[in-house]
Amino acid sequence: NGLPTKIMSFCFKLYGSHYLYNLFAPILAKMFIADLRSYEVDPSRIEQHEQLDENRKNLRLLTQDVFQAIIDSAPQFPLQLRILCSCLYQVVQQRFPQHPLQAVSTVIFLRFLNPALVLPHEFGIVDAEPLPRIKRGLTLVSKILQNIANNLIFTKEFHMRCFNDYLRSTFDSATNFVLSISEPINLNTIIPSDEQQPIENNISDSTTLSPTYPMSYISDANVLALHRLLWYHQEKIGDYLSSGRDHKAIGRRPFDKMATLLAYLGPPDHRPLDSQWISYDMTATKFEELMAKTQMHEREEFKSLKALNIFYQL
């Protein structure tokens, strides 16, 4: 749990929440509404009225649905997390040339996907904690997914060995998924959303449209935390960048620009960070949902305030 791990976990939380919701919410909704099936495959924990073969089938089908949803979601994987995965891939490749893909795969499933799947209520994907039966199923699915990520079959847990054939059939798909989210990204080819032209007016036979990505927002507390981090560690950052293999190609310009900006900003404030603001979701999704449910724009109080023309409405 060093600084790099904490930074990655923070980035996963900051930039990956909407992706996780879109990925897992449809599957979990079906389980919460009408799923009476059991997913227990450990003979020592199975109920008397349950059938082991039936439970194995249930778990395999659920795992297939979750895994396929992950594979299909590659085009929607957040840009910021793609950059993170690409950086991780390159750093590991320099030190351990045989294992960069394995490192990215392990981190994505262990630190990002599986925690949200096992504890969806803590990630805002569902409102209530899953029932023990469903939670057990999600835990077993995450265990299978982690073995897929690690490119390993089950050996110690005898009751999980029945999934080894399925595991082997997924390794190539998982590898392709991790490769697709770890590819180097040329930020110069990404068109900012405010510069996008209507698609029908921007297509020609010789034109390739760049993908668009949603804007992300961070709080003032997060900006302050980043300011402190860069200010107190800028010398180490400079030493690290100058010792890298890409130093000759990139030069000192990025670091010099950062140092100039920090000199302009001056030292960071020493006021304590408010953890409430750090975890605050600047997209205000829940607030917007509340406004929509109460139909606030139809109320006379809202119309009266709007008539004053003292607010700017987006």
Image (cartoon, grey):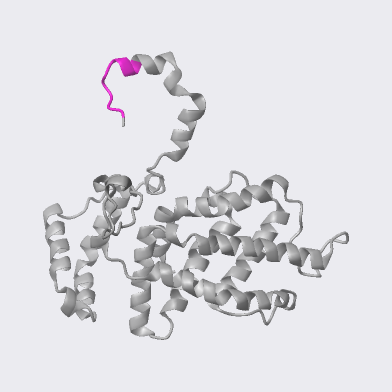
Q: Is residue 208 magenta?
A: no
Q: Is residue 45 visible?
A: no
Q: Is residue 140 above or below residue 126?
A: below
Residue at the spot 49% in from the left edge and 59% down from the top edge: 73
Place residue 227 in its image quadrant. bottom left
Residue 224, image x, y percentages? 27, 51
Q: Is residue 294 above or below residue 185?
A: above
Q: Is residue 172 above or below residue 205?
A: below
Highlighted range, magenta: 305-313
Q: Is residue 261 visible?
A: yes
Residue 286, image x, y percentages? 47, 38
Q: Is residue 311 magenta?
A: yes
Q: Is residue 209 left or right of residue 39?
A: left
The one of 128 and 32 positioned closer to us in this rendering: 32
- Residue at the right extreme, as displayed: 48
Residue at the spot 67% in from the left edge and 82% down from the top edge: 155
Quadrant location of the C terminus? Answer: top left
Q: Is residue 293 left or right of residue 183?
A: right
Q: Main secondary structure of the magenta part?
A: loop
Residue at the spot 59% in from the left edge and 80% down from the top edge: 152
